Structure formats: structure tokens, C-alpha cells
Image (cartoon, rainbow, N blue to C red):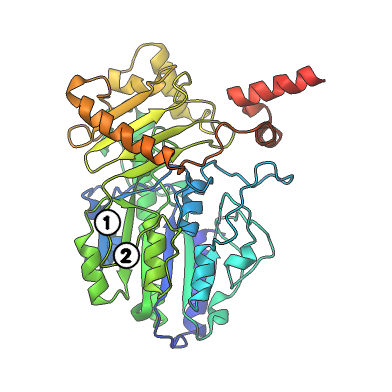
């Protein structure tokens, strides 16, 4: 069943079941959580497609322009949002860890930590999640979500989610709910509203029909997503819940195209965030003054908890955007580690103007083995590189090795294609950003499991088989062979 149909079904049940039933003074809070979606929308200055629902939310609420995910992969980001922590600091930065039945890659949160849904329950909320969890730590879904338990511990979740009648179960309590939308992962839709010839191709992509089609397709999924958002908002309104529900709309990371998803360029980490609905005037005014601030997507967690009247734990990396005491971040730490069966280790610092990246495996290509290897676009890009048919910018991502350091002036080079790390004119800025990253690591903040131990690597080999051709897997296979 398509997710949009399920949304309509669930929210129709809401109309019949709980109109006027939620008598609490506390607002309901709803996350509309989108997969793999870049902020290519009118509220962010891109008019290629219309997004009336999201635009209306922004006009009555606030759209944040400079929001960045701490990781360009779904499960680390989702783990961060649900814990309020930075994924590298709490060791959830490896994609799909804690999924091994033998516990060889398990990650446990500190005993004193509670997830956001658990904190919301303590604040008097019912909690639910329609769709995927994808958290990289050991947990029992029934502890996090009070409505609709499906009996699965550590549930990764299908996009349509468990089937339960949450509107009937809410009763008089306020709710904290999540509805997961497919975003760029929409499949099988017949809609073709954007001509590939009409889109703008960034300089790092070949200007071919294949790449144009991917870009056009992303715009189309944004149109579809906006329709789903509109349906949710309309059902909330029909149920009499709109006046007491704060709605957050955001994505986990950028579009899933090459060089975006899984990488720390802005195409992979720049995301939309819109907050609207029953936000009181004072908070809304505060939020609007911060709409252009440099913001971590993880700040959604603390802001949600604050709006619910909960106490923000000291261990939160997340900050409350609606607090009078909020201090704008002058930099963000970005991190990327293993993705499925591909081991990597990249760290970055993003300021309002500059991006600094450090590649800890400079001897490896950007495009190591991955799930997109058989995409026609990937094959075409590689073939064009082999035949010398790429421009300098288009060939950058195809190199067999990568620089140890990358530095970009985002104001003059928003596409991040001119590496200034070796430019003497930027030596002071390079040194400054290096020191920020070094100080963060020296403070014990980078707790990712790098390098991985033998048992963890073996769990990846057992899960992915011969698809893992990273040096880590090759080394462990050889060690096992020698032992035999």
C-alpha cells in the first residue's frame, strides 16, 4: 500500500475518533520526516516546482535556510535526532550498526540516557512512529512508542509502518508523532511533470540525459511530497487538531544522487526545515529571528522537547532554537563513516562561509563499492572519465585517490569544486578550521568505532558477502584463511 494512502486512512480515522478529544493545554507535536530530500523549493529560492503546502507552512511559521544534517546517511542522522546527540560523539555514525543477531556490532547508549520519545512520554505525551526507525543502537521499540507496538525489538521498519489505530488510542493526552515520507525514494510513480531539458545541471555532473533525468526526478518527488504534506495538514484541520498541533517538516539528508547522499558536500547535508502550526507568538518570533542562523538538524530534538514543556538533558548536543538563551553556532561538525559494506572516515567543519573536509583514507577513491554501482548514471560517469570526456569539475569525483584535505569558499564556490587547501591565500582559514576539528577530537568527542575490530568487520562480511571489498573485509578474510 502506498504511504500516501495509509496517511489518508489513518488521518481519516483521526477525524472520526478524536475530534475535540485532546483537552490538554500542551500542544501535539508532529514530525513529517522526509527521506533523501534537498531544499529545492520556492521557500528556499528554487521555483522549478510549486510546493503550496510547504510554502503555506513557511508563510505562517518559519523556514530555516541554513540547516545541515551532521551525517549524509539516514540511520546516523535518525539516531542523532532521536537521542539529541551528535552521531559521531555517541558512536552511531556507522550505517546500520546494531543489526547483527550475534551482537558483534552492537552500540549501547549510556544507561542514564533516554531517547526523545521516552522523554516526551515523561512529559505526558503519547508517542508513535508511522514508518522506519533505523536507529544504530540497541533498543526496544516498545519502550519508545506508546502507541501501536508491533512487538519487534529494534524495529528498522517498512515505509508504511505498523498497522494500528493510533487516533483511537490517543485519548485525552497530547501526542508526539512521526510520519515518515518516502521523498526521493518514491518508486513506480507515473508522474513526469519536469522536462529533463529544463533543469540546471551543477558543474560537477555531466550534462547528459541520464543526469538531467535524475535531477528532474528529484523535483517531481518534491511535488509528490508536498501533496502528502498537504493531505496531512488538511486532515489535521478537519479533525479540529490544527489549532493545537505544532508541525515540523524536515529531511534526513540531501537527495540520493551521487556526490550528494553519503558525502559531506552541501548537496548531501543541506536540508529543509519548516516549523509551523500552534507555535505561540513569542516562540515564533524567536524562531523567525534565527531563520538564517547556522543550525544543526539535531536541534529539532531539543526544540521539540522544549515546546512540550520537557527538560532538556545536559547530555544533549541538540539546542533549543526557541530558547531566549540560544546562541548561534559558529560552526558545525560533520562526519561520515561506514555505509552498508563500504568503510570510510571523513570529517568536516562547516561555517557560514567555509567548508573544511579531512579524508582519513586519501588512498581510496570517493566512489568505493556501493549500492549505486549498477545505476546507469554511475556507469556513464565512469565511462566518460575513462574516455576523457569530462571537464575538470566533472572528473573530480572520479579520481582514484582523493586529497587529504579540502577547503571551499562557499560564498564564491557554492558547488565546492575549487579546493583551496593548497592556496597560500587561505592558509590562515585552513589552520583555523583544522584546529576546530582537532580540538573536537582531542576533547574525546569523536567516538566512532574506527578502525573497526575484527568481529565487527566479520559481521559486515556475513551480512553483505562478497559485496564488501573494502580493505577491512579483505584483511579479515585473509586472516581467517590463514587461521584455517
Percent x, y for residue 315? 46, 58
Q: Which residue is mark 1?
A: 64
Q: Secondary structure at mark 1?
A: strand
10 Å crowding of disc 1: few (<14), some (14-19), many (20+): many
Identify the residue at the far top of this view. Answer: 387
Q: Residues within 10 Å of mark 2 (few under 14, many from 20)?
A: many
Quarter of the C terminus within the rendering? top right
Q: Nearer the viewer, residue 312 or 443?
A: 443
Asked if the residues shown at circle 2 and circle 1 are in contact, with their CB atoms under 8 angstroms apart, the answer is yes
At a point 58% along the width and 25% down the height, the residue shown is 470
Q: Which residue is mark 2?
A: 275
Q: Quadrant of residue 352?
A: top left
Residue at image location 48% in from the left, 65% down from the top: 178
Q: Is residue 471 above or below residue 262?
A: above
Task: Pinpoint residue 74: horizontal percent, then vertical percent.
Answer: 48, 47
**Does residue 392 appear to the left or right of 365 in the view shown?**
left
**The N terminus, quarter of image:** bottom right
| Front residue of this view, candidates 17 and 318 | 318
Q: Is residue 224 rendered to the left or right of residue 476?
A: left
What secondary structure is marked by label 2?
strand
The answer to whether residue 114 of the structure is visible from this angle is yes
Q: Residue at x 24, y 24 (%)?
A: 420
Q: How many marks?
A: 2
Does 192 appear above or below 116?
A: above
Tell which circle, 2 or 1, labels the residue nearer the N-terminal end: 1
Amino acid at each position: 500500500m502506498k504511504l500516501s494512502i495509509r496517511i489518508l486512512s489513518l488521518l481519516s480515522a483521526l477525524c472520526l475518533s478524536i475530534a475535540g478529544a485532546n483537552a490538554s493545554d500542551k500542544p501535539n507535536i508532529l514530525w513529517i520526516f522526509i527521506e533523501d530530500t534537498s531544499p529545492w523549493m520556492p521557500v528556499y529560492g528554487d521555483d522549478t516546482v510549486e510546493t503550496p503546502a510547504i510554502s503555506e507552512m513557511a508563510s505562517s511559521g518559519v523556514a530555516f535556510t541554513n540547516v545541515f544534517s551532521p551525517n549524509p546517511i539516514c540511520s546516523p542522522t535518525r539516531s542523532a535526532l532521536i537521542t539529541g546527540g551528535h552521531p559521531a560523539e555517541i558512536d552511531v555514525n556507522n550505517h546500520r550498526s546494531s543489526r547483527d543477531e550475534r551482537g558483534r556490532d552492537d552500540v549501547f547508549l549510556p544507561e542514564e540516557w533516554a531517547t526523545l520519545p521516552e522523554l516526551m512520554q515523561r512529559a505526558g505525551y503519547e508517542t508513535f512512529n508511522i514508518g522506519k526507525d533505523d536507529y544504530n543502537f540497541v533498543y526496544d521499540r516498545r519502550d519508545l512508542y506508546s502507541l501501536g507496538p508491533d512487538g519487534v525489538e529494534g524495529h528498522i521498519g517498512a515505509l508504511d509502518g505498523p498497522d494500528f489505530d493510533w487516533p483511537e488510542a490517543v485519548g485525552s493526552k497530547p501526542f508526539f508523532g512521526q510520519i515518515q515520507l518516502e521523498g526521493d525514494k518514491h518508486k513506480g510513480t507515473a508522474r513526469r511533470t519536469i522536462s529533463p531539458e529544463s533543469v540546471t545541471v551543477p558543474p560537477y555532473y555531466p550534462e547528459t540525459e541520464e543526469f538531467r533525468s535524475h535531477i528532474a526526478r528529484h523535483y517531481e518527488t518534491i511535488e509528490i511530497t508536498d501533496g502528502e504534506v498537504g493531505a496531512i495538514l488538511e486532515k489535521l484541520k478537519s479533525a479540529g487538531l490544527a489549532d493545537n498541533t505544532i508541525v515540523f517538516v524536515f529531511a534526513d539528508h540531501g537527495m540520493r544522487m551521487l556526490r550528494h547522499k553519503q558525502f559531506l558536500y552541501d548537496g548531501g547535508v543541506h536540508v529543509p526545515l519548516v516549523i509551523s502550526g500552534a507555535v505561540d507568538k513569542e516562540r515564533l518570533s524567536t524562531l523567525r529571528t534565527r531563520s538564517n542562523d547556522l543550525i544543526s538538524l539535531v536541534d529539532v530534538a531539543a526544540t521539540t522537547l522544549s515546546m512540550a514543556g520537557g527538560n532538556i538533558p545536559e547530555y544533549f548536543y541538540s539546542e533549543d532554537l526557541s530558547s531566549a538563551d540560544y546562541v548561534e553556532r559558529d560552526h558545525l561538525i560533520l562526519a561520515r563513516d561506514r555505509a552498508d559494506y563500504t568503510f570510510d572516515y571523513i570529517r568536516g567543519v562547516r561555517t557560514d562561509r567555509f567548508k573544511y573536509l579531512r579524508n582519513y583514507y586519501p588512498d581510496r577513491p570517493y566512489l568505493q563499492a556501493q549500492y549505486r554501482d549498477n545505476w546507469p548514471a554511475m556507469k556513464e560517469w565512469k565511462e566518460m572519465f575513462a574516455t576523457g570526456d569530462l571537464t575538470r569539475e566533472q572528473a573530480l569525483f572520479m579520481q582514484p585517490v582523493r586529497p587529504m584535505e579540502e577547503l571551499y569558499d562557499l560564498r564564491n564556490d557554492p558547488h565546492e569544486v575549487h579546493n583551496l587547501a593548497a592556496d597560500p591565500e587561505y592558509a590562515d582559514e585552513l589552520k583555523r578550521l583544522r584546529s576546530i576539528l582537532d580540538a573536537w577530537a582531542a576533547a574525546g568527542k569523536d567516538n566512532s568505532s574506527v578502525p573497526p575490530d575484527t568481529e565487527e568487520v566479520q559481521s559486515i562480511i556475513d551480512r553483505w558477502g562478497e559485496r564488501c571489498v573494502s580493505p577491512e573485509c579483505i584483511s579479515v578474510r585473509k586472516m581467517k584463511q590463514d587461521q584455517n
